Amino acid sequence: MAQNVSAEGLEPTKSRTMFLALGDAISNGTFPPGSRLPGELKLAEQFNVSRVTVRRAMAELERMGMVDRKPGVGTVVADRGGVQPVVADFTNVLGHLLEMGRKTTARLLEFGYGQPPEPVRVALRLGEDEQAQRSVRVRVVDGEPFSYLTAYVPEAIGATYDRDDLAKTSLLALLERSGIEVDHAEQTVTATLSTPTTAKALTIGVGEPLLAVTRTVFDPQGRGVEHLQALYRPNHYRLQIALNRVDAGGTRQWAPVAETSMGSSKKRDP
Amino acid sequence: MAQNVSAEGLEPTKSRTMFLALGDAISNGTFPPGSRLPGELKLAEQFNVSRVTVRRAMAELERMGMVDRKPGVGTVVADRGGVQPVVADFTNVLGHLLEMGRKTTARLLEFGYGQPPEPVRVALRLGEDEQAQRSVRVRVVDGEPFSYLTAYVPEAIGATYDRDDLAKTSLLALLERSGIEVDHAEQTVTATLSTPTTAKALTIGVGEPLLAVTRTVFDPQGRGVEHLQALYRPNHYRLQIALNRVDAGGTRQWAPVAETSMGSSKKRDP
DNA sequence: AGAAGCTGTACCATATTTAAGACAGATTCC
DNA sequence: GGAATCTGTCTTAAATATGGTACAGCTTCT
């Protein structure tokens, strides 16, 4: 299989590289919160770059609130440096947000019908020429863009609600309101980079990391009902799941903890 | 809460931005496989950049195998453009790889004892001054770097095996061999960017997206046994999980499918 | 007070990126 | 054959990133 090429090619600028390196070292524990990191001159030497470059990286770190810098003192790692505050759950993001009493709204960016891209068509098990409703939304939590959602729904199903509905209600809720039986789903998780489009919508920079969750939802008959791709800002959101070590097929394995139906029970210790 | 700043600041080069934009448009479905994308001149105009910039982005796309370009013809999106081949499973990566008969080895990059960084210490519920064993490994599958693993293990437990063991056996297997009872774990998923260090180890470029899985493993008494951070290349690996729609606490929710103990059973349709 | 170390700022030289335009060769379509 | 369109290549110029250096001002320590 080809595609071994990966490395080299359109690297970001040195300042950005440097910024990533330092940021990693910080959230990494190499430079614990409260500690002072080496002087600009020393860093410039260590990384084999000029001081200007170091300064740019540092400025960015400061802008992100990861460090505090003072003349005469130095650059010190901020408390909680790099370790982001996180909203977390696994299966139902929205539910958890609501539980926490956060205000969340949705902004509809695109809406229309057409032929879905191949992979989506296959995932939904649609015919060659079947149409689908495509919608792009941005979910806003507490005033801040939180997730970028691209959804495809088979035409017939999509017709059961308005574009106005989309701005108010969650898609899944709409479907179930329309009498669609939502039975099971296949979910996939990856990482991507923000593109100019998504970056703007989420008010972040281009080339920043995003958590990509793709979910295909089926009804009891195995018919595709919804294909959703959600992009989350890692700073604002992390997937979390509890695992149990179980015996399976002779070997010990991990198995996701079946939620104990009584909401979010996290305690495990007696 | 501060840290609203996010946007603007140390953007990558225009070529890189352009590359991301095009790459997204491709895997997005805007330019389906087989289709020809606009000429360099037209793109340059649309994106308000020069043709040189477009060409760089294109060259990178070609290098990644996402497009084919021919003089007189144009640039056409490769079949399977952007849609990466994927190894996939959720809970046990390694097990699945082995199942598929892939050859996997590990390379030990770092090994030593010391105080773990704060977050790790807290996650493992260690005392203020407790030491931990830190190891950094790269797992290689079929000759290609596959994951970058940083593990912390409480000193006492770490002492039960060699550094040589680490290169051969999976950490979890080592622990269980040493009589440690592995009971449950807390797992968290995020996205990050490759740093100079991780990029080199994984033979990718700096600033590429990585899937970060952090897992803290506990014994039956709730004592921290292992803290593992795994970085995966999205091209090579995706997390996947099956969900069922269930009633829980009055509302319909998603619940992870409990693996049916008989290995990897994927069929769901009757 | 003085020394040492740090950041903030300014200046100039160099390398890289980007812009703009011109031309050659390949391919497709009429 | 000829027009239109595309990529490949080259040249020239501007904008930006980087390298190297010097100096001012602030803090901490001796």
Image (tube, coloured by chain):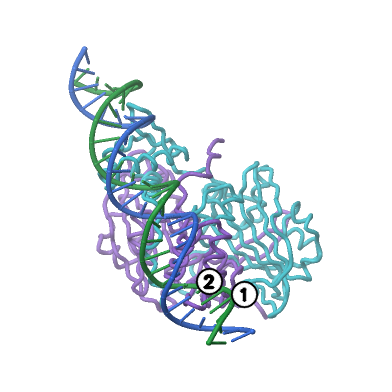
Chain colours: A purple, B cyan, C green, D blue
Residue D5 drawn above or below residue C4? above
Query: On the image, numbered disc 2 is attached to which residue?
Result: A83
Residue B50 visible in the picture: yes
Query: Residue A162, image x and y in percent?
Result: 25, 60
Residue occupying the point 62% across, 47% down: B145
What chain is tagged by disc 2?
A
Amino acid at the residue labelled 2: Val
Residue B103: image location, x then y, percent: 69, 43
Number of residues whose C-alpha sits closer than 10 Å to that of mark 1, classed few (under 14), some (14–19) or many (20 or more):
some
Q: Quick check: B111 above or below A11?
A: below
What residue is rendered at 41% in x and 60% in y? Answer: B10
Where is residue A79 drawn, in percent x and y? 53, 78
Say yes or no: labels 2 and 1 on the same chain: no
Image coordinates of residue B102 in percent, x first then y, are 66, 43
Q: Which chain carries label 1?
A: B
- Marks 2 and 1 close (CB-CB < 8 Å): yes
Q: Which residue carries the number 1 mark?
A: B118
